[in-house]
Amino acid sequence: MFYFRKVGSIVIGSILLSIGINFFLVPFHLLDGGIIGLGLIIKYLTGVQAGLIIIVFSIPIFIIAWIYNKDYFYNSLHGMLVSSFAIDFLYPLHDTFISQFQIPPLLSSIIGGMFIGLGIGIMLRSKTSTGGTDLLAQFLAKIFQVNVGLVIFFIDALIICLGGLLISPNSFFLSSITIIFVGLFTSMCTWNLEY
């Protein structure tokens, strides 16, 4: 039963995450934090698919996980692969979504953050994640005994500062709002979890 719950969490979490990214962040060149944020920065600058970049950038963190904690490695590998695939798979639908719904950038950054935070939180509740900095955050949360959502928030802040320099100050401001909501909704989903 636990296996089916984990698979369901990965699929549902990945879909929510990719909806938040493709339908609410990408139209305004907004960023999430972590490896996803780095993938989006490269996508905006070069046009390379974000999911592919996420996989490539996650490799060093997965090597660390393999060496120090194979449970984290196995619990996150599937989440990273499925979420990366979902991001690239749903990307072509964002043009249709944008043409149907005219959402202001500020509201889009808030809603996108809510979707992403719920997606990440659902996966973390089943002891899985998208890997990348979520995986790194799980290590740090366990070491320092703090909520994983707060750790993710601080890592995300560093990434969007980089994105603000490379993309635009407006992207930085709206992305800051996005990661606040990602952190809030991830924290709400993971509040009573122990790592």
Image (tube, helix red, strand yellow):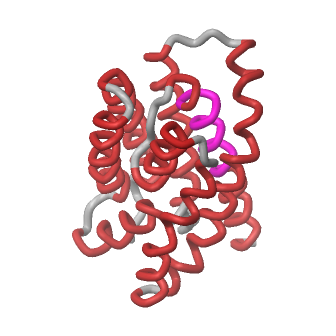
Q: Quadrant where the N terminus lies?
A: bottom right
Q: Give the percent coordinates (x, y) of residue 122.
A: 57, 52
Q: Where residue 62 sits: x, y (%)? A: 49, 76
Q: Residue at x 27, y 48 (%)?
A: 158
Outermost residue to the front: 46
Q: Is the stretch drawn in magenta largely helix, strand or loop?
A: helix
Name of the residue lying farthest toward the left: 144
Residue 175 point in image, percent of width and height? 38, 31
Q: Residue at x 40, y 57 (%)?
A: 192
Q: Which residues are magenta?
A: 13-25
Q: Is residue 12 left or right of residue 38?
A: right
Residue 38 lies in magenta, yes or no?
no
Q: Is residue 57 above or below residue 23?
A: below
**Could you tell me which quadrant the C terminus lies in?**
bottom left
Give the residue drawn at x 50%, y 67%: 58
Between 119 and 171, the residue placed more toward the observer is: 171
Left or right, residue 161 beside residue 14: left
Q: Nearer the viewer, residue 31 or 17?
A: 31
Residue 48 left/right relative to 142 = right
Of residue 147 and residue 136, the one placed in the foreground of this image is 136
Furthest-bottom residue in this view: 67
Residue 187 in picture, x, y percent from top left: 39, 47
Q: Is residue 23 magenta?
A: yes
Residue 78 vertical position relative to residue 24 in the rendered view, above or below: below
Number of dots carrying numbers: 0
Residue at (63% x, 29% y) in the render: 23
Camera-side residue of 59 and 179: 59
